[in-house]
Image: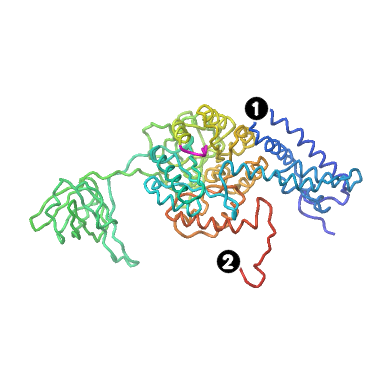
Amino acid sequence: MPRSRTRNTTVSSGATVKALLQELEEVRARCIDAESEISHSGGELAPTYVDGARNLVHYLALRRKDLRSLQAGLTQLGLSSLGRSEAHVMDSLDAVIAVLRRLDGSGEGDGAIAFETRQKSDMSAHLRRHAERLLGPVEHDRVTRIMVTLPSEAADDWLLVTELVDAGMDIARINCAHDSPEAWRTMAKHVRRAAEASGRACLVAMDLAGPKLRTGSLPLGPAVVKIVPRRDERGNVVSPAKVWFHDGSGAATGSSNAVAVPILPRGVLSTCSVGDLVGLRDTRGAKREGQIASVEPTGVVVELTRTTYLETGTELELVTSAGTHVATVGPLPRKERAITLHVGDELVLVREGDEAVGHDNERARVACTLPEVFDHARDGHRVWFDDGKIGGVVVSCDGDEIVVRVIDAPPGGARLRGAKGINLPDTELPIPALTAHDEHSLAVAIEIADIVNVSFVRGPADVELVQSRLAAAGAEHLGLVLKIETVPGFRHLPEILLTAMRSARIGVMIARGDLAVEAGFERMAEVQEEILWLCEAAHVPVIWATQVLDQLARTGRPSRAEVTDAALAARAECIMLNKGPYIVSAIATLRDINRRMHDHQHKKQSLLRRLRAWDGDGIEA
């Protein structure tokens, strides 16, 4: 028989029941020894998480050794391979050990299998109870809740919130990085009202922004607006460009797609009529002429058939039946410039407030928002910008400037703007989880929310900080969700969980946006699996977040890949959708996918429901 090429996954012909039993008993002993880690974590555990903490350290001890050969041996004997033991490690070990002892003749096994089945059920029930305590009930025909990020419009339109609740939203997420405390209060009020009207439970979660590292503002460009007519494939004008020349009163009521341009002096447009001409020379000196298509009390809509650039101060000649008048373009907004970067370019990060930003003669310069970066970045550390669109490596740092060489960018280069995220996966930054803005947001959350989501949790100290704030405010009843979105947060997840277990209502969000950038996109699938396993071992509910059905929410049409992703997400206790114009459709689709997966999958276990797909009727409806 040919020898297997799979490393460490086959049991040798000389392996015996006794050898497997000895190895399993050694594993069990390591698990018992690991229980001391609970007392070393400090603080008193919430009673509901005592079993979860013990099982967590058992699981960590179990996984500290490669068990693939052991699994192969157990499988050959028709025994459990421990591959689904996350929620009940010790019971799974004891059950297999009892059977091996019976096979070995050294024990009776005394009901071990029945005991294992009962205990597994009890341990899985812990997670279900914790999920319901934190996230609320789940509909009987699906396995996960749906969290939805509320758009800004939710503060003005309670009927929109009602649509979201009716579609299946179980938790409304308010992003404290946007809008105002007053808007947040109104959103929460609308959620409560909509939930009461629908007869469905819907909780409110407030997402603290956290110490997000971003690029600083870049210099403003000229106050110029570009006006372009629509052309066909041969360059012929299909429809003229429309400009709303107004006296400062805003957009045209009759032409919503017109570009708004203010005109001085005020009142100069009052003599204009439909058919009058407007002549000008644009910023390039090109002569342009347009015709007035409609007139309103505060302005006129002018149609132009050629591309035109207007800037503040551009002179216009209005040819009307009452004579010719001269006007000028009023103040136009200046847009922030972008920096274009290519592989091989160098970008200099400077402290916020440094005026030398933008392009100099040799390389671009941009500020970053956290001063701690300049004291802790080192040569060779990786840097990612704008959700991973641009990657680089630190080549020098002197405390005031960090020089980054671009090593990853699209072939044509990438444009970097202000307020874009910066990730430094190799740099340990000693920054607290709560900024001054977060402290104010937390005060509002204590007033109106059911759950607080804490961003950029890096270690147990961040959890302790939030717990102390909640305790001081008498708000320990609030749910606490820890967002894992950095490499340090992932690395310290066991300690983070043990610290969080001092609170009764806790959860983990796999924030896959920043986490994918920091850990590497190629590792993201592995990382999210490991977080799911560890949290199941701790009996801590998980929220699967970032870009779930994102294309559907934005465009109305899902991609095939994101539908598969949404199905995989059913292994979490909650799935988060982001906002978008088609969010109601995205909720309904996710609800349907989740219902279909309800009978097929629970965590890592495939459920063997009867399959009708090959009964002659084709794919089930």
Q: From the top left corner, tell me how far across and down residue 611 is, in percent.
A: 67, 64
Does residue 453 belong to the magenta stretch? yes
Rendered image coloring scheme = rainbow
Classify residue 593 by image quadrant. Answer: bottom right
Left/right placement of residue 138 relative to residue 199 reads right
Front-most of residues 102 and 382 = 102
Whether the magenta-drawn stretch holds residue 474 is answered as no
Q: Which residue is mark 1?
A: 42
Residue 365 drawn above or below residue 259: above
Q: Quadrant of the C terminus?
A: bottom right
| Secondary structure state at the residue bearing disc 2 | loop
Q: CA distance from mark 1 to mark 2?
A: 53 Å
Q: Amino acid at mark 1?
A: Gly
Q: Amino acid at mark 2?
A: Ala
Write the residue at 57% across / 54% down: 565
- Comparing marks 1 and 2, which lies closer to the viewer? 2
Q: Earlier in the sequence, mark 1 or mark 2?
A: 1
Q: Is residue 359 visible?
A: no
The percent coordinates of residue 575 (x first, y second) are: 55, 49
Dot 1: what SS?
loop
Q: Which disc, if any, is residue 621?
A: 2
Q: Which residues lie in the magenta part?
A: 448-454
Q: Residue at x 11, y 51 (%)?
A: 325
Place of residue 126 in the rendered image (x, y in percent of width and height, measured from the top left): 66, 42
Label 2 neighbour load within 10 Å: few <14, some 14-19, many 20+: few
